[in-house]
Image: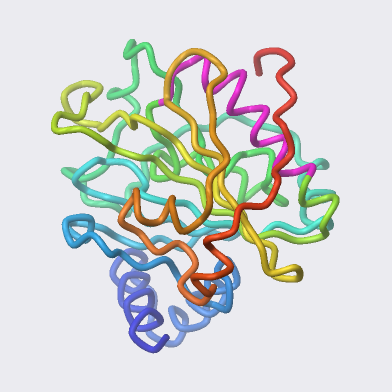
């Protein structure tokens, strides 16, 4: 716990230029996004290369300067926060996060004419304030996503997640990309294109969870898998404080209601 807290504190100081006292306060606020205040942990050493933690108002991100994408984006969602989010009018404002090194971040020009959507990990529709919604449009929270996948199936999975939050009252949610294979395609020869995208949920009251996992392509294919299976596949322990027994069990997740494009 101390090691994770220290890493987040140091990264926050470096990224924002905050004083240690201010950074400590912001760091404590960021820990609310994680189960028991414990951030995800890499089990695959290569993922640590040029990875930087970023704390936003309503979510936290681990950004990779190698892939120029987030590796995960974590939220703590409640019934009340979603009520607040419905009152915030959507304002698309995609932007590069200038706190990240220029040679490690994605730029708007990378996505231009790429044929891929700028796909949110933590969705704009989850954001309870204008500031947090603006932050959700940072490219540090974005991956190249197949247009049909983003606008139809993934939109439905995001909606199913909010439905589950409204049913249960609160959930911890971590969304991220999967990069599989020896050669990963890129847009503009710079930004890695995920082969799959996942959304993992954990209910801290019932102490159970599961994850949606879907290929980043056209069509409506997805699987519901255990948290332990997902963690092994991506090389990240998403919920370090949750027991392996809990993570090995798969709960039923709502079926995404596929309707129309965003």
In the image, taking residue 213 as reference, residue 140 lies left or right, namely: left
Is 90 on the left-hand or right-hand side of 243? right
User: Does 32 appear above or below 82?
Assistant: below
Q: Position of residue 150 (x, y in %)?
A: 53, 23
Name the residue: 72% across, 35% down. 159
Tell me if residue 67 is in the magenta stretch.
Answer: no
Magenta segment main secondary structure: helix
161 within the magenta span: yes
- Which residue is drawn at the image coordinates 30% and 28% (left, top)? 193
**Of 4 and 220, the residue lying toward us:** 220
What x and y, as percent, mark residue 124? Answer: 62, 39
**Nearer the observer, 248 or 143:** 248
- In the image, residue 169 sits, relative to residue 195, either above or below, namely below
Above/below status of 77 relative to 96 = below
Image coordinates for residue 24, horizontal then vertical, percent: 46, 83
Q: How many marks?
A: 0
**Residue 217, relative to residue 99: is it above or below?**
above
Write the start and end of the magenta stretch as one range: 145-163
Where, quadrant-wise, is the N terminus in this rendering?
bottom left
Camera-side residue of 247 and 122: 247
Residue 208 is drawn in which quadrant? bottom right
On screen, residue 146 versus residue 161, left or right, reads left
Residue at 51%, 75% in the rendered image: 26
Residue 77 pos. (x, y %): 70, 57
Image quarter of the C terminus: top right
| Residue 12 falls in image quadrant | bottom left
């Amino acid at each position: 716990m101390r090691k994770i807290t220290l890493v987040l504190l140091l990264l926050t100081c470096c990224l924002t230029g905050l004083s240690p006292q201010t950074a400590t306060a912001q760091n404590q606020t960021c820990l609310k996004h994680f189960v028991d205040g414990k951030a995800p942990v890499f089990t695959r050493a290569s993922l640590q290369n040029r990875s930087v933690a970023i704390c936003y108002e309503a979510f936290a991100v681990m950004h990779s300067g190698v892939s120029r994408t987030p590796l995960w984006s974590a939220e703590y969602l409640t019934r009340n926060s979603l009520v607040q989010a419905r009152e915030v009018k959507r304002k698309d404002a995609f932007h590069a996060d200038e706190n990240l090194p220029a040679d490690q971040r994605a730029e708007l020009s990378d996505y231009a004419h790429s044929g891929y959507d700028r796909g949110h990990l933590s969705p704009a529709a989850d954001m309870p304030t204008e500031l947090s919604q603006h932050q959700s449009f940072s490219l540090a929270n974005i991956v190249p996503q197949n247009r049909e996948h983003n606008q139809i199936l993934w939109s439905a999975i995001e909606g199913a997640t909010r439905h589950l939050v409204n049913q249960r009252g609160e959930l911890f949610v971590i969304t991220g990309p999967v990069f599989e294979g020896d050669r990963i395609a890129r847009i503009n020869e710079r930004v890695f294109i995920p082969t799959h995208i996942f959304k993992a949920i954990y209910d801290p009251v019932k102490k159970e969870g599961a994850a949606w996992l879907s290929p980043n392509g056209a069509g409506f294919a997805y699987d519901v898998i255990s948290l332990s299976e997902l963690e092994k596949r991506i090389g990240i322990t998403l919920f370090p404080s949750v027991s392996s027994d809990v993570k090995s069990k798969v709960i039923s997740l709502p079926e995404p209601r596929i309707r129309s494009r965003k």
